[in-house]
Amino acid sequence: MAFPQSFLDEVIARNDILDVVSSYVHLTKKGSNYFGLCPFHNEKTGSFSVSPDKQIFYCFGCKKGGGVINFIMEEENLTFPDAVRFLAKRANLQVPEETESQESSRLRQRVLALNKEAARFYYGNLQRPEGAAVAAYLEQRKISRKIAMDFGLGASLDQWDALITAMAAKGFTKAELLAAGLAVQNNHGRLYDKFRNRLMFPVIDVRGDVVGFGGRVLDKSEPKYMNTPETITYSKRRILYGINLAKKTKRPNFILCEGNIDVITLHQAGFDNAVASMGTALTTEQTRLLSRYTKELVLCYDNDGAGRNATQKAIELLNNSEFTVKVLNIPNRVVDGQPVKQDVDDFIKNRGAAAFERLLSGSENHVEYQLENVSAKYDLTDDQQRVAYAEEVSALIAGLDNAVEREIYTGRAAERAGISREALQLEVQRAAKRRLSRERRERQRKELNPAAALQPQERSSRYSDIHSAMAEEGVIRLLLLDNSLASACTSLPAEEFSSPLLGKIYGALLSCHADGRPMQVSTLAGILNTEEMNHLTGILQRPESLVNGPQAMADYIAVIQDSYGKRQNTGGLDPLLAARDKFKNKKGYGGKQNA
């Protein structure tokens, strides 16, 4: 491990999980735990809990959990070493010398420095004759010099190694250029610039660091847009273009656009609350980032098939979240009597900022947008299509949580189709009953198959012997509730656990005990990955009593050892599976005797 264990213990001890989490999440005490809205997924009802006694957090909605280091890793998007440094700084602790983690941190800092120098190089090219085509393109798109400077726009040259040569002169290595995603290596080992002959968009995070780049071609060649690949500094799921500027806005909401140019055009027109995702649909990580600055989002994607699809996916992601969601539809413009689609950039250039402000003020909420989309699919003058419309729109309205909303939108949908409110209300009620029936069947299916509910979410960690695994979970819960019970485990090696994951956790806890350190979830942050930690904290949500704890521990151990013995006798198979296979081998499939 890169950090001395004594230092990690001190970091954990100095950073009480309740104090740390409370600086990010508003928590309310309920019993011995604290609850609030989960910062890792969108929800209106708080399912995120913090246990000061166990020093863990857990969300009953998205199933994320862990100790204080895991929380910072998730919330701040940091690696384990960086999360430890973050908490050490918070507690005014000096970080000791590191080995592997120090090298990782050094590479990250070098890549950030390289990105910054590359951004300066690209920007400088705009003033050079070689960058004249990009400069002309910016002028053609009516992007001012000031806004180009604010966003750090630049030009990659139409050369194979212009950036590589310039960065090598500043002391950056080929390995660093590859790590930053600024260079590509061919099959012969030769390096060349990833971005060539493109308008360059530096991607800057909320801290002001250049974490990556986007590039747009000036002609009809493909791909039209190219972004930095996943690197040590850049993850497209976690970044929003323009967030470094939009976070300073005084406007009450954020406008979520489809492309970089749309964001730049909006900022130039005075809408400094615009951001865009980088070549991906809206993600949970991006909504978490947005939630730091606003609780109202305006979706402003292109008015075409892809744009409508992106809007619908964003609405589904944000459904039942803390965000108020509106949708802004860019109207078509009419050319020679024919409708022509236009994006944000076209609209502002054709109609101006004031017209966009009016459009923004009149943007629909997401329910109105969905109703409009449903009605557009049907010819409401045709009786059969009106019936089909009523069925689909009823299912949509039945899914709304608020009874007043259901009443309002039932009336609007009925009026649009020219049918009575009462008739559509009956359809909505039927749709609600069908929805409840489906949910009930799903619950019953799960209740009739309790073993499935006990399995880890990650398929790679699934239990092969449920009976033994339940006892193994019990052992882990007891150890974490009462460290003194470790003395009862001397006869139980981790190898006898049926679950490799539970055996790993058990072995790590016993190692802590052997070293004289307390057995607690936080100390496992550097040993378990995110999914393993989520599963461990999920295990700890199940009830376990310390009343007669030694006897409970002995009972669990007996079950584990008995199951282990049976597996040994059946070649490692679960006894039930072994019995099934024995029966098949004896009778053959279909009950026939083997020849």
Image (cartoon, rainbow, N blue to C red):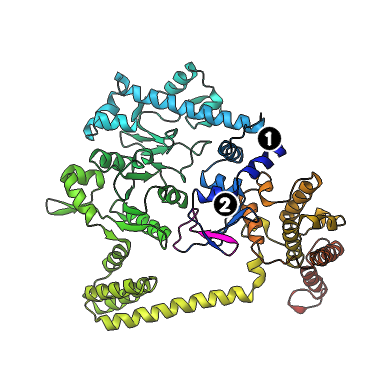
Q: Earlier in the sequence, mark 1 or mark 2?
A: 1
Say left or right for 281 vs 362: right
Q: Which residues are magenta?
A: 31-44
Type of amino acid under label 1: Ala
Answer whether residue 38 is magenta in the image.
Answer: yes
Say left or right for 130 vs 477: left
Extreme residue toward the top, this view: 169
Say left or right for 299 vs 75: left
Compared with 61, 413 (above or below) is: below
Find numbered disc 2 in the image and state the secondary structure of the residue it sits on: helix
Q: Indicate the position of residue 45 as horizontal and vertical percent values.
A: 47, 64
Compared with 54, 169 (above or below) is: above
The residue carrying mark 1 is 2
Q: Main secondary structure of the magenta part?
A: loop
Packing grade of label 1 (10 A; few <14, some 14-19, many >=20) is few
Residue 164 visible in rendering: yes
How many numbered marks appear?
Answer: 2
Q: Indicate the position of residue 458 as horizontal and vertical percent values.
A: 62, 57
Q: Indicate the position of residue 497 as horizontal and vertical percent values.
A: 79, 58
Residue 268 marker = none
Type of amino acid under label 2: Leu
Q: Quadrant of the N terminus?
A: top right
Real-space Cα separation, disc 1 to disc 2, in angstroms:
26 Å
Residue 183 visible in rendering: no
Answer whether residue 33 is magenta in the image.
Answer: yes
The residue carrying mark 2 is 18
Residue found at x 63% / y 76%: 448
- Name the mark nearer the viewer: 1 or 2: 2
